[in-house]
Amino acid sequence: MANLYWNNEKTDSDEAVKLMKEHMVDLTESRFFVRQEGDDSGSYLCVYVERDEEGNKTSQRLPDKFEGWRTVLVYTPHEFIKYVMESRKE
């Protein structure tokens, strides 16, 4: 039965990422990073949000489904996105 909940039309992944970024501006004041990922159960939008300096969560809850995509919220340490995810490999 769970298969029926997730089995529907999805917005193009690039468009869904763009729309999620716009949506996240209202849900957090912390740095965030959105990308399409996948695992054994299929594709999903993964939203990485940095915790504050004290380690507290800084985002409101995401919808379970966004533009037809399953969503996953991952909290990262403070400045992790800046120094790890957005850093350039040389």
Image (spheres, rainbow, N blue to C red):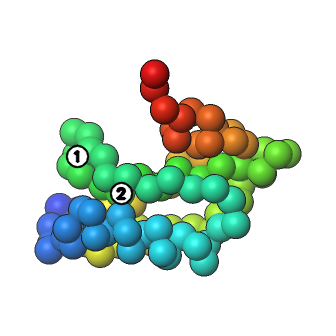
Looking at this rendering, what residue extends furthest in the front direction? 90
Residue 48 in sight from this viewpoint: yes
How far across and down, in percent of the image, does residue 24 sit? 54, 70
Helix, strand or loop under label 1 = loop
Q: For mark 1, what is the residue?
A: 41
Residue at the farthest right position: 54
Residue that appears at 26% across and 44% down: 38
Q: Residue at x 27, y 63 (%)?
A: 14
Alpha carbon distance from label 2 to label 1: 13 Å
Position of 75 with respect to 29 (left or right) is left
The reply, left or right, for residue 24 in relation to residue 4 is right
Residue under numbered circle 2 = 45
Element on which disc 2 rests: strand
Q: Which mark is residue 79?
A: none
Q: Is residue 24 above or below residue 87?
A: below
- For badge 2, the amino acid type reads Leu
Closer to us: 49 or 70 = 49
Whether residue 17 sits left or right of residue 85 in the image: it is: left
Compared with residue 33, is residue 15 higher up or lower down, i.e. above or below?
below
Question: Does residue 30 appear left or right of residue 56 in this picture?
Answer: left
| Picture coordinates of residue 68, whole percent (x, y) | 25, 72
Image point 31% across, 69% down: which residue? Answer: 16
Eyeballing the image, is 36 above or below 2? above
Q: On the rendered image, what quadrant is the N terminus found in?
A: bottom left
Residue at (22% x, 46% y) in the render: 41
Local crowd size for mark 2, using a 10 Å CA cut-off: few (<14), some (14–19), many (≥20): many
Residue 35, x across and y down, in percent: 37, 52
Q: Give residue 10's quadrant in the image.
A: bottom left
